[in-house]
Image: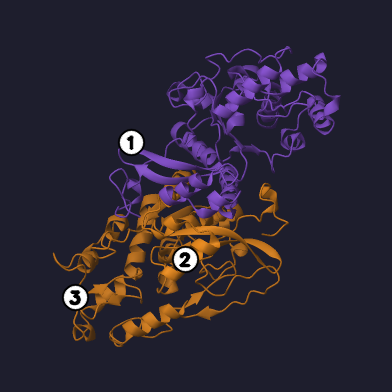
Chain colours: A orange, B purple
């Protein structure tokens, strides 16, 4: 604990700013460090290794992500997937969509992220306020920070999974105190849990699928954003027994459900469409794969079932259309 | 976590509309000691009454049974909130200082604003409230009633509450009060961690960074919502700290308090001026040392401080 901080005097604590999840390079630039802009094709080693795995199964000829450079990420100095610095944006005429990796467009080309589709195809300038891996605490924090710092024209929120939550501590970098959020989920390993609980004071219930505190706080945040006039949506919760995304169609309300039915309800028993390795070398599956799935699509070699991971172009287009027609038409 | 049949299972639900609504968060007064909010208040008042039996003090009688009056939701108002004309009524939200612990109904901040400044104000103060309760109640009041204006007086930043259940039988959220290491026995601390899954740091430390982060965020949120906000800064270090935010027009009592705290021998129980100061500046939970040779110390705010706060709210926001 820094002794310049008086726990009984909030004025000695740093102001609240954006919470970054830390998945995306460049790493945080604090006061004296220079921000160096770079463009990357993979945010993490995990993303790269998952890509290599699925690429070995899918057809180089028909899969649109066969070229590893097809998806590129460019982050501004605040760590958001935006070319522009936020200070240079005309916020009077620009809105923001705040959320997790679905909003950020993880594994999806930039032009097909929700914010880019709204900007380009609906003539509504939108900034991408998504942070990969963000829980609802982070999304709430970032929506408030966008409003406080930039007062965007509109704020649209796409909430994430309720089991994700962040624990805030004060850390110091370059002699500068800052709020550091560490994100926890039930998927964290035992070692990570132990370290978090023992050394960082994180509540053990953050590692359960149900932390009542997180859910109550999320509900409170929903009320707050209703009062602030922000539009809100929520990605579907994951279910163990079903295809994790099979309720996405319920909230996205696509005008055309054909591909959703193929992807989520192919028949009574399978949670996803099945393709043999031979099928995957034919053009047939690729209307579905290329449109609905981003490049982190999963395929199970034992059951041959294809699983959606992050949203692809068509789903992002449907979400953009939902946002447009429900709020701005 | 193992769920029992009184716990709602949130691991399987389809969207945010399925989360049970938030509700007002209240701490429960100990009705065993009613008309006192808790045994501490009863003990403080009784001990002062015993010590001051020869002095003409305005709280020297036993407490009247209607000292505290609550509406059907448990807030200190004569009126039920559903009967209030909210277009023309404000809400003041806070802890025991707003509730008016140890002070009569007509001397609470909300009563003074209503009767002396003609600003109808409902009292949403909760004795023992943390800033999380205050924030939650302010949001819930806005959502449910949309008051003309919401005024918040924040509490000490180290207080917090932890939500540990949604009880499906009672249809209520359940919260644990985080008292910090100062007031918990080791047994209570263990129980809180094991049964209610309260974070270790909330129980064993006097404060938590996470709690302070929440307080900062609440302030930002209420700035965006246009809520009027005040609050004591810092540890309860005496009246100088109150002076900073209350900005009273007349400093006489505050100066007297400061003088008496540093030079207790200057205080005289037989001096009428000093006793007028005690009657005005202190509530009935005045803190007295064993011997009357020491000056009284402030418990909850007396009627003159509440009047100064009401005046501050009026002149900064309604004049």
Secondary-structure class at tag 2:
helix
Which chain does the numbered disc 3 sit on? A
Residue B92 % position (x, y)? 57, 30
Chain letter belonging to callout 1? B
Q: Position of residue A305 (x, y in %)?
A: 22, 75
The dot on residue A87 is none
Mark 3 neighbour density, 10 Å: few (under 14) some (14–19) many (20 or more): some
Q: Are marks 1 and 2 in contact (CB under 8 Å)?
A: no
The answer to whether residue A74 is left or right of residue A67 is right
Picture coordinates of residue A136, whole percent (x, y): 45, 56
Q: Which residue is mark 3?
A: A274
Residue shown at the point (41%, 48%) measured from the top left: B195
2 or 3: tag closer to the N-terminus: 2
Asked whether, in this view, residue B275 is left or right of residue B50, the answer is: right
Picture quarter containing residue A50?
bottom left
Local crowd size for mark 1, using a 10 Å CA cut-off: few (<14), some (14–19), many (≥20): few
Image quadrant in which you'd find residue A2: bottom right
Q: Residue furthest left?
A: A268
Query: For the residues marked 2 and 3, what is the alpha-carbon distance in whole angstroms?
Result: 39 Å
Disc 1 and disc 2 on one polypeptide chain: no
Does dot 3 land on a helix, a strand or a loop? loop
Separation of marks 1 and 2 at Cα, in angstroms: 34 Å
The answer to whether tags 2 and 3 share a subunit is yes
Question: In this rendering, which labeled residue sits more in front, label 1 or label 2?
Answer: 2
**Vertical arrangement, residue B180 with respect to residue A50, above or below:** above
**Depth-wise, is mark 2 or mark 3 nearer the camera?**
2
Quick check: A172 left or right of B261? Answer: left
Position of A101 relative to B241 (above/below): below
Q: Which residue is mark 2?
A: A194
Q: What label does residue B170 carry, if any?
A: 1
Residue in the foreground of this view, choosing between A231 and B105: B105
């Amino acid at each position: 604990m820094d002794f310049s901080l008086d726990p009984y005097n909030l004025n000695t604590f740093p102001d609240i700013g954006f919470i970054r999840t830390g998945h995306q390079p460049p790493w945080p630039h604090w006061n004296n460090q220079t921000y160096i802009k770079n463009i990357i094709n993979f945010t993490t080693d995990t993303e790269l290794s998952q890509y290599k795995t699925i690429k070995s199964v899918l057809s180089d000829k028909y899969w649109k992500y066969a070229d590893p450079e097809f998806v590129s990420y460019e982050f501004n100095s605040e760590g958001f997937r935006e070319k522009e610095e936020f200070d240079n944006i005309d916020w009077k005429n620009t809105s923001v969509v705040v959320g997790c990796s679905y909003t950020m467009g993880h594994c999806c080309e930039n032009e097909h992220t929700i914010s880019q589709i709204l900007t380009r195809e609906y003539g509504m300038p939108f900034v991408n306020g998504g942070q990969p891996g963000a829980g609802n605490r982070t999304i709430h924090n970032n929506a408030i920070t966008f409003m406080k710092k930039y007062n965007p024209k509109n704020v649209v929120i796409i909430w994430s999974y309720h089991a994700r939550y962040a624990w805030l501590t004060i850390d110091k970098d370059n002699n500068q105190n800052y709020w550091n959020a560490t994100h926890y989920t039930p998927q964290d390993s035992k070692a990570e849990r132990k370290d978090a609980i023992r050394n960082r004071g994180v509540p053990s219930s953050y590692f359960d699928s149900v932390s009542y505190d997180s859910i109550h706080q999320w509900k409170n945040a929903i009320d707050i954003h209703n009062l602030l006039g922000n539009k809100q949506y929520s990605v579907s919760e994951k279910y163990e027994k079903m295809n994790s995304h099979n309720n996405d169609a319920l909230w996205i309300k696509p005008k055309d459900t054909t591909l959703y039915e193929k992807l989520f309800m192919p028949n009574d028993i399978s949670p996803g469409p099945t393709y043999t390795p031979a099928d995957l070398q034919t053009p047939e599956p690729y209307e579905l794969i290329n449109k609905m799935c981003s490049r982190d699509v999963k395929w199970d070699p034992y059951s041959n079932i294809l699983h959606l991971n992050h949203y692809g172009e068509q789903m992002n287009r449907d979400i953009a259309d939902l946002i447009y027609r429900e709020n701005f038409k | 976590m193992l769920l029992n049949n009184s716990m709602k299972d949130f691991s399987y639900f389809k969207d945010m509309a399925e989360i049970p609504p938030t509700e007002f968060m209240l701490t429960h007064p100990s009705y065993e000691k009613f008309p006192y909010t808790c045994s501490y208040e009863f003990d403080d008042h009784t001990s002062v009454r015993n010590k001051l039996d020869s002095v003409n003090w305005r709280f020297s009688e036993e407490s009247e049974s209607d000292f505290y009056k609550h509406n059907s939701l448990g807030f200190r108002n004569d009126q039920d909130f559903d009967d209030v004309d909210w277009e023309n009524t404000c809400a003041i939200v806070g802890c025991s200082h707003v509730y008016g612990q140890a002070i009569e109904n007509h001397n609470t901040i909300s009563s003074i604003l209503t009767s002396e400044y003609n600003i109808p104000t409902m009292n949403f103060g909760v004795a023992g409230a943390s800033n999380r309760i205050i924030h939650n109640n302010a949001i819930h009041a806005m959502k449910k009633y949309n008051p003309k204006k919401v005024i918040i007086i924040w509490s000490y930043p180290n207080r917090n509450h932890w939500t540990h259940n949604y009880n499906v039988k009672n249809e209520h959220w359940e919260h644990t009060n985080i008292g910090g290491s100062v007031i918990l026995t080791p047994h209570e601390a263990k129980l809180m961690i094991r049964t209610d899954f309260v974070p270790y740091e909330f129980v064993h430390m006097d404060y938590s960074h996470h709690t302070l982060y929440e307080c900062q965020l609440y302030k930002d949120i209420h700035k965006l919502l246009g809520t009027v906000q005040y609050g004591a800064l810092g540890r309860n270090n005496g009246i100088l700290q109150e002076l900073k935010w209350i900005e009273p027009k007349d400093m006489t009592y505050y100066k007297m308090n400061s003088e008496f705290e540093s030079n207790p021998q200057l205080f005289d129980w037989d001096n009428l001026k000093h006793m007028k100061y005690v009657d005005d500046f202190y509530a009935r939970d005045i803190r007295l040392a064993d011997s009357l040779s020491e000056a009284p110390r402030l418990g909850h705010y007396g009627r003159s401080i509440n009047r100064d706060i009401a005046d501050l709210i009026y002149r900064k926001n309604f004049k």
